[in-house]
């Protein structure tokens, strides 16, 4: 959830939510009418909502024989669900905040943030990255960051094996079959440089941090997240764009010209670089995807101009525009011309932009001052499922990378879409307000994709909603008193304010 302005001062979007007082307030207003932002949906249907998943942040899946299990990370900890029958999901277990609390934590406060949960499909381990403000931790006190290593051998009986403390804890990614973990985020050591932390996980009960720095980005800059493509190349997003690394095998190192062995602790650069400022003004990328190998058919159709494996899809998260017109967009870049180390160094080479998309001036887009930025996305069969906060989950056909088109959208009442995940033909949406919603595209979406027809522009204004105890509430954001919209916070519902200690 890394939000960047020109300062790129913070990598954390904190949500201070007074649930108890909100419940009382809602109860007092039951039966009253409230003017709200109008919901909208097209070519998408809701199949199911996973119960008790409010404040959902990220999702992962693992197969246990014929049993299909979803792992849901949220402010309340980690939950597992049997989703073998997607229309009848079954709750399995909940690793609670009380179980995760370290000495000095306040278990009544939220866990944060683990916005990209990873699960080892072989050893059945889950990794939860812990941020500085978890459990009410605030300056000038100690604020532990790092990773929980959780055994999910029995998904109905989750157990913490260890907590590995290190100087960051925003996102963690499996490297080399989960034998190693790459952790990204703001380096909170005195060095204050952007880098990847490498942890040896061959013994999950005794994780060992290796004395190395991967993908160093300089003082005051950060790394944000890592995605591993189907060829095994690890793509690191953050300040100054996205760069890819081989983490095993023998490869030519473009920075030295020598062939050497790549490892998780000493990877070999592959390609990547910065993005033109006109397309990504903050020069910060949040997450990425490179269609190649077994995932090639998920990405744009290869052409002579953009051959197989040459495109990189990535996100700028920034809130400079309430409609994402100027910032916070989805960008498709060409990796061609960056294979010889051009993306490394103090002034990384800019990749050529092939296509750009945002919800600005699109059907289903809310007018006015709402929270809008590209966030996490997932790709299947040339359709990108994309979270845009209060602008909902968008479905974009990228068959032609130069002209992405919208073929459907899901923006229900009070939605704040965090991350969508394609899974066995459905999309699991982690919504920080509504919980995990399982949706499917309808026939109309695929007809639009086949014909190349962009969903037409319509406008919709506010609507009146009769409040009940179950009515979802929009979570309004306000600037952090120190970091501004580099770290937006949810306003307290009663006082309209929030505490600086609850954020970055």
Image (cartoon, rainbow, N blue to C red):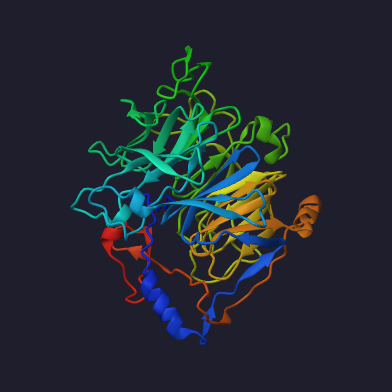
Q: Which residue is drawn at 40% across and 79% down?
A: 24
Q: Which residue is drawn at 48% across and 18% down?
A: 253
Q: Residue at x 54, y 63 (%)?
A: 323
Q: In this rendering, is residue 465 above or below 397?
A: below
Q: Total marks drawn?
A: 0
Percent of width and height locating residue 140: 18, 53
Q: Can residue 78 be seen in this view?
A: yes
Q: In this rendering, is residue 12 above or below 259?
A: below
Percent of width and height locating residue 222: 37, 41
Q: Is residue 355 visible?
A: no
Residue placed most toward the observer, 53 or 342: 53
Q: In this rendering, is residue 95 above or below 410?
A: above
User: For this view, does 374 lie left or right of residue 494?
Assistant: right
Percent of width and height locating residue 7: 35, 51
Q: In this rendering, is residue 232 above or below 372?
A: above
Percent of width and height locating residue 391: 56, 63
């Amino acid at each position: 959830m890394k939000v960047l302005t020109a300062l790129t001062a913070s990598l954390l979007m904190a949500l201070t939510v007074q649930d108890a007082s909100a419940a009382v307030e809602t109860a007092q207003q039951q039966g009253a009418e409230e003017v709200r932002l109008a919901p909208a949906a097209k070519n998408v249907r809701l199949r199911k909502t996973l119960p008790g998943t409010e404040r959902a942040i990220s999702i992962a899946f693992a197969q246990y024989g014929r049993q299909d299990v979803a792992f849901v990370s949220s402010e309340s900890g980690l939950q597992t669900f049997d989703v073998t029958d997607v229309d009848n999901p079954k709750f399995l277990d909940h690793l609670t905040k009380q179980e995760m609390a370290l000495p000095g934590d306040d278990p009544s406060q939220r866990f944060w943030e683990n916005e990209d949960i990873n699960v080892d499909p072989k050893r059945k381990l889950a990794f939860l990255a812990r941020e500085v403000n978890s459990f009410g931790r605030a300056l000038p006190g100690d604020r532990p960051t790092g990773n929980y290593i959780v055994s999910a051998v029995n998904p109905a009986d989750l157990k913490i094996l260890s907590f590995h403390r290190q100087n960051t804890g925003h996102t963690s990614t499996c490297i080399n079959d989960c034998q190693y973990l790459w952790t990204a985020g703001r380096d909170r050591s005195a060095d204050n440089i952007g880098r990847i932390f490498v942890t040896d996980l061959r013994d999950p009960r005794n994780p060992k941090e290796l004395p190395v720095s991967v993908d160093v980005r300089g003082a005051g800059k950060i790394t944000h997240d890592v995605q591993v493509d189907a060829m095994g190349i690890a793509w690191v997003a953050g300040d100054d764009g996205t760069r890819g690394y081989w983490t095993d095998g023998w490869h030519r190192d473009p920075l030295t010209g020598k062939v050497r062995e790549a490892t998780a602790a000493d990877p070999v650069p592959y390609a990547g670089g910065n993005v033109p400022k006109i397309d990504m003004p903050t020069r910060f990328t949040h997450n990425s995807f490179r269609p190649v190998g077994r995932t090639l058919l998920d990405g744009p159709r290869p052409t002579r101009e953009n051959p197989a494996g040459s495109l990189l899809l990535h996100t700028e998260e920034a809130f400079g525009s309430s409609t994402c017109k100027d910032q916070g967009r989805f960008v498709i870049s060409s990796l061609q011309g960056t294979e010889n180390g051009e993306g490394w160094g103090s002034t990384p080479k800019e990749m050529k932009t092939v296509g750009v998309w945002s919800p600005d001036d699109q059907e289903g887009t809310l007018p006015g001052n709402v929270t809008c930025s590209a966030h996490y996305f997932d790709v299947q069969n040339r359709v990108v499922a994309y979270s845009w906060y209060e602008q909902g989950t968008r479905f974009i056909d990228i068959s032609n990378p130069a002209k992405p088109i919208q073929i459907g959208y899901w923006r229900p009442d009070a939605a704040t879409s965090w991350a969508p995940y394609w899974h066995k033909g459905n999309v699991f949406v982690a919504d920080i307000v509504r919980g995990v919603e399982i949706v499917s595209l309808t026939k109309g979406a695929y007809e639009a994709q086949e014909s190349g027809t962009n969903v037409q522009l319509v406008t919709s204004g506010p609507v009146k909603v009769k409040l009940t105890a179950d009515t979802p509430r929009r979570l309004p954001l306000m600037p952090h008193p120190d970091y501004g919209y580099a770290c937006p916070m949810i306003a307290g519902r009663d006082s309209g304010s929030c505490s600086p200690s609850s954020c970055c």
